[in-house]
Image (cartoon, rainbow, N blue to C red):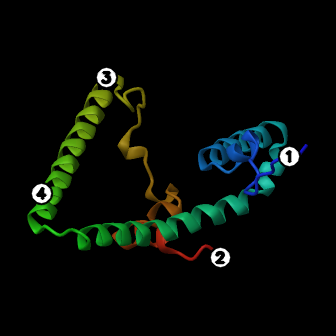
């Protein structure tokens, strides 16, 4: 008897294929993060510097990536009329979604009346009680600085 053997890549198991999927890795990381937060809150607090570093890295890389993707997309278009149409659609989407978000905010604010139960006499307020950190972002560049700061 002769046996026929095939030469090629060995088949991967279903689990090893699943582990390589990005969505699975994201869900697994979220589940592990929740588990650490519930079961070992001290460890979660010890890992906070890693979290802060990761978030700073993501903030640092998002703006250049979005800029490169948009620039490459526009540069690769053959038809300028098509590019203009896409630009008009993008501005239209932005305006419509901005209007929708403003309307939702106004409706929610009128329904729930935030701050209506807060009875404060303005003459009793003192500006010296406001912490120094409240004025840290008093300018536009103050808002930009945390997003562009080095993650170190």
Question: Which element type, helix, strand or loop, lies under badge 1?
Answer: loop
How many callouts does the rendering have? 4
Which residue corresponds to mark 3? 111
Residue contact between numbered discs 4 and 3, judged by CB atoms under 8 Å: no
The answer to whether residue 105 is above or below residue 98 is: above
Q: Is residue 27 left or right of residue 78?
A: right
User: Residue 71's x, y, as percent?
Assistant: 30, 72
Q: Is residue 147 left or right of residue 3?
A: left
As measured in the structure, the alpha-carbon distance from the residue carrying label 1 to the one carrying label 3 is 77 Å
Could you tell me which residue is drawn at 58 percent across and 68 percent down? 57
Front-most of residues 79 and 129:
79
Could you tell me which residue is drawn at 34 percent across and 27 percent down? 113
Residue contact between numbered discs 1 and 2, judged by CB atoms under 8 Å: no
Could you tell me which residue is drawn at 43 percent across and 45 percent down? 124
Which residue corresponds to mark 1? 3
Residue contact between numbered discs 2 and 3, judged by CB atoms under 8 Å: no
User: Residue 118's x, y, as percent?
Assistant: 42, 31
Which residue corresponds to mark 4? 85
Front-most of residues 130 and 134:
134
Res 114 quadrant in image: top left
Is residue 139 in view?
no
Residue 152: give its label: 2
Q: Which of label 1 and label 4 is nearer to you?
A: 1
Could you tell me which residue is drawn at 43 percent across and 69 percent down? 65
Does label 2 or label 3 sit earlier along the sequence? Answer: 3
Question: Seen from this angle, which residue lies furthest right?
Answer: 1
Does label 1 or label 2 sit earlier along the sequence? Answer: 1
Residue contact between numbered discs 1 and 4, judged by CB atoms under 8 Å: no
């Amino acid at each position: 008897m002769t046996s026929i053997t095939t030469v090629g890549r060995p088949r991967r198991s279903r689990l090893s294929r699943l582990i390589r999927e990005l969505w699975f890795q994201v869900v697994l990381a979220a589940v592990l993060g929740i588990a650490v937060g519930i079961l070992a809150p001290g460890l979660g607090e010890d890992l906070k510097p890693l979290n802060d570093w990761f978030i700073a890295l993501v903030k640092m890389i998002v703006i250049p990536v979005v800029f490169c993707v948009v620039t490459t997309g526009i540069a690769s278009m053959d038809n300028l009329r098509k590019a203009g149409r896409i630009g008009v659609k993008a501005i239209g989407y932005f305006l419509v979604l901005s209007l929708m978000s403003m309307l939702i905010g106004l409706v929610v604010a009128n329904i729930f009346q935030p701050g209506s139960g807060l009875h404060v006499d303005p003459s009793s307020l003192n500006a010296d009680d406001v912490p120094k950190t409240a004025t840290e972002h008093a300018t536009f560049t103050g808002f930009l600085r945390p997003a562009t700061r080095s993650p170190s």
